């Protein structure tokens, strides 16, 4: 009843300021009146510290809602199947690499616009999201069910894995996943030796092109693996949007590019424009045949531990295949 009371209070003030015209929140109020929260207040609770404060969470959540693609990836890696999840940025409705694990999971909007009515109807006992995506919705979400937010997503994927694991009481599983990751990284670095090659990371998006640096999901993984960046790309930053005349900055021993398909063919149009440009064709990495197209979902759109393994596998395959 605690969550029902707070949520109805929020709805009341919302209707007060929006007048007497019909609002979708009326349906939500009705739903909240007829549905009881799935949180059993007699169940043992745990305190979870997160970006929005401290939240009391049931010891073993069974009905988890996830509001980020990164979080979906991480929950699946932990062996937790959510009852509701935001749709993937690419896929129908989920990324191909997780699709077979997401049968019967309800789509509840996207990261920026989760559907509160659907979330209520699913009677969650835990909601997981991120401050960088849903900060303004935290009061409404936490009124529905205990809600835990990470600070941001992407480069913080290991910290988020630990946080989400704590929230779903799977900390031992998270520790095992991280140990397996570290072993895989160590194996890669041993094969790499003392003279690592340089790599460029390029993303084609509708209307522009991004050069990714170390404070991005793929850039952080490249750095952890001991790979180097060309001098012009050694920036402790996320990414830069670059003009086509800056193509020479992309030269490296290996170039990996990924194309955003979330806006139809617009990202593909940018890709084709750049790949067919004389400056691109003149890159040494292109002439050497060490340029590879990789999955945008794996390399940047998802950013969970399953995706991290996909990136490492790509780098292992393409780099060491060439070295043999």
Image (cartoon, grey):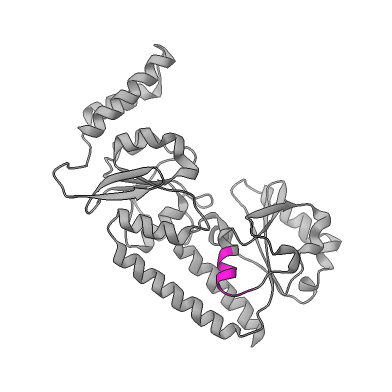
As drawn, 318 above or below 234? below
Residue 233 rendering spot, x and y as whole percentages: 71, 63
Looking at the image, which residue is at 40% across and 59% down?
161
Q: Is residue 110 left or right of residue 261?
A: left
The image quadrant that residue 318 belongs to is bottom right
Query: For this rendering, which residue is in front, 145 or 238?
Result: 238
Query: For this rendering, which residue is in front, 152 or 298?
Result: 152
| Residue 238 seen in the current view | yes
Q: Is residue 281 left or right of residue 263?
A: right
The image quadrant that residue 231 belongs to is bottom right
The image quadrant that residue 249 belongs to is bottom right
| Residue 99 seen in the current view | no
As drawn, 16 above or below 274? above
Farthest residue in the top direction?
20
Farthest residue in the bottom direction?
324
Residue 163 in the magenta stretch? The answer is no
Residue 109 rendering spot, x and y as whole percentages: 44, 40
Looking at the image, which residue is at 35% across and 68% down?
175
Q: How many marks?
A: 0
**Quadrant in which the N terminus is drawn:** top left
Q: Is residue 44 left or right of residue 133?
A: left
**Quadrant in which the C terminus is drawn:** bottom right
Q: Main secondary structure of the magenta part?
A: helix
Residue 221 in the magenta stretch? The answer is yes
Residue 311 rendering spot, x and y as whole percentages: 55, 68
Residue 88 rendering spot, x and y as whole percentages: 49, 50
> Which residues fall within the magenta stretch?
220-227
Looking at the image, which residue is at 35% across and 71% down?
176
């Amino acid at each position: 009843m605690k969550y029902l009371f707070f949520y109805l209070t929020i709805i009341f003030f919302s209707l007060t300021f929006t007048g007497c015209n019909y609002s979708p929140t009326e349906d939500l109020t009705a739903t909240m009146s007829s549905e009881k929260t799935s949180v059993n207040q007699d169940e043992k609770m745990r305190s979870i510290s997160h970006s929005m404060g401290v939240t009391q969470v049931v010891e073993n959540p069974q009905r988890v809602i996830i509001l980020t693609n990164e979080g979906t990836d991480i929950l699946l890696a932990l062996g937790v199947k959510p009852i509701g999840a935001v749709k993937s940025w690419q896929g129908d409705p989920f990324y191909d690499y997780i699709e077979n694990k997401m049968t019967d999971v309800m789509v509840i909007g996207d990261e920026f616009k989760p559907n509160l009515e659907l979330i209520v109807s699913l009677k969650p006992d835990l909601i997981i999201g991120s401050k960088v995506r849903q900060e303004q919705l935290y009061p409404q979400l936490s009124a529905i069910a205990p809600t835990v937010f990470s600070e941001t997503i992407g480069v913080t994927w290991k910290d988020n894995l630990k946080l989400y694991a704590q929230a779903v009481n799977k900390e031992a599983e998270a520790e095992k996943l991280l140990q397996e990751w570290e072993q895989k990284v160590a194996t890669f670095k041993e094969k790499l030796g003392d003279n690592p090659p340089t790599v460029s990371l390029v993303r084609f998006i509708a209307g522009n092109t991004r050069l990714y640096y170390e404070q991005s999901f793929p850039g952080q993984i490249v750095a952890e693996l001991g790979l180097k960046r060309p001098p012009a790309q050694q920036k402790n930053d996320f990414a830069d949007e670059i003009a086509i005349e800056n193509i020479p900055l992309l030269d490296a021993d290996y170039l990996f590019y990924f194309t955003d398909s979330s806006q139809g063919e617009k990202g593909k149009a940018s890709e084709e424009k750049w790949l067919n440009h004389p400056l691109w064709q003149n890159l040494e990495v292109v002439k050497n045949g060490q340029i590879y197209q990789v999955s945008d979902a794996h390399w940047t759109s998802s950013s969970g531990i399953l995706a991290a393994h996909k990136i490492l596998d790509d780098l292992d395959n393409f780099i060491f295949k060439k070295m043999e």
